[in-house]
Image: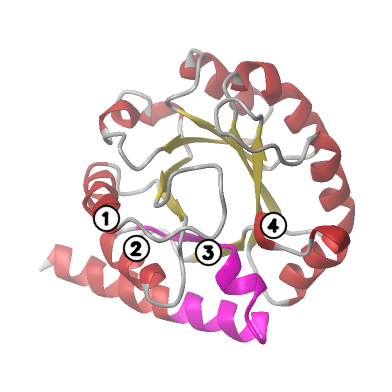
Amino acid sequence: MPHIQIMPSILAANKGHLADECRRAEDAGADGIHIDIMDGHFVPNLSMGPDFVRMAKDAVSIHLSVHLMVSQPDFFAEPFLDAGSDTLILHIEANCDPSLVLKGIRDREKRAGIALNPDTSAQPVFSLAGQLDEVLCMTVNPGFGGQSFIASVLPKITEIRRLLPDIDISVDGGVDGVTGIQCAEAGANILIAGSYLYRSAEMSTSVRDLRAQGESALAKRGASSQS
């Protein structure tokens, strides 16, 4: 069973001090930084471009996971890989051949992932399993921070974990000290949290507690599945 990783979502950080906010996540013990890229088409909002990833790469040494919430990830993949993305995640709902984009990411020796919107079933990822390092289950509708967690996604996480036991499963949206544990119990091992971590009084404590509680929940799930 993969280990729990905690990734603060930079979308919730102080936009006027993004390099400092990246360093704050690293200093707090985060495993990586999650970077949401929005094109104004796939989702209504616009966010950062490749230069932000380049800046983050210079600011910190932890993993940079870049989530392309864009209509044409085949157009955006190369610039974001060139900028320093360690993981690049595209949406199955996007307008492209996901196999080609995933192959391009792995040809660059980077981690490749597929994201699923809350209403999208798990089925599309199974035919791509051999090309994937990670499946991101959105637990809010993509495009806006601060939304409420959608608990109906939890069975989908469990289904993916059951059929793809060795893959990384990440969750993004409304993740906190309660919902993060529910996701780990379902089988997720990468917990992406924005507001919960960046607005906490002491990020390092929140990162440590979320990781410890997630590890406990994931271990309990593993034990129960083997009994």
Quadrant of the rendered structure where residue 93 is? top left
Which of label 1 and label 3 is nearer to you? 1
Name the amino acid type tagged 2.
Answer: Cys
Residue 128 sits inside the magenta stretch? no
Q: Residue furthest left?
A: 227
Q: Are marks 1 and 2 in contact (CB under 8 Å)?
A: yes
CA gap between label 4 and label 1 equals 24 Å
Q: Earlier in the sequence, mark 2 or mark 3?
A: 3
Name the amino acid type tagged 3.
Answer: Gln
Q: Earlier in the sequence, mark 1 or mark 2?
A: 1
Name the amino acid type tagged 4.
Answer: Ile
Quadrant of the rendered structure where residue 205 is? bottom right
Residue 124 percent coordinates (x, y): 31, 26
Give the residue pinned by disc 2.
183
Q: Is residue 210 left or right of residue 221?
A: right
Residue 113 percent coordinates (x, y): 51, 36
Give the residue pinned by disc 1.
154
Q: Earlier in the sequence, mark 4 or mark 1?
A: 4
Residue 207 lies, with reference to residue 70, above or below; the image says below
Which residue shows up at 69% across the image and 54% down it? Answer: 63
Q: Quadrant of the C terminus?
A: bottom left
Give the residue pinned by disc 3.
5
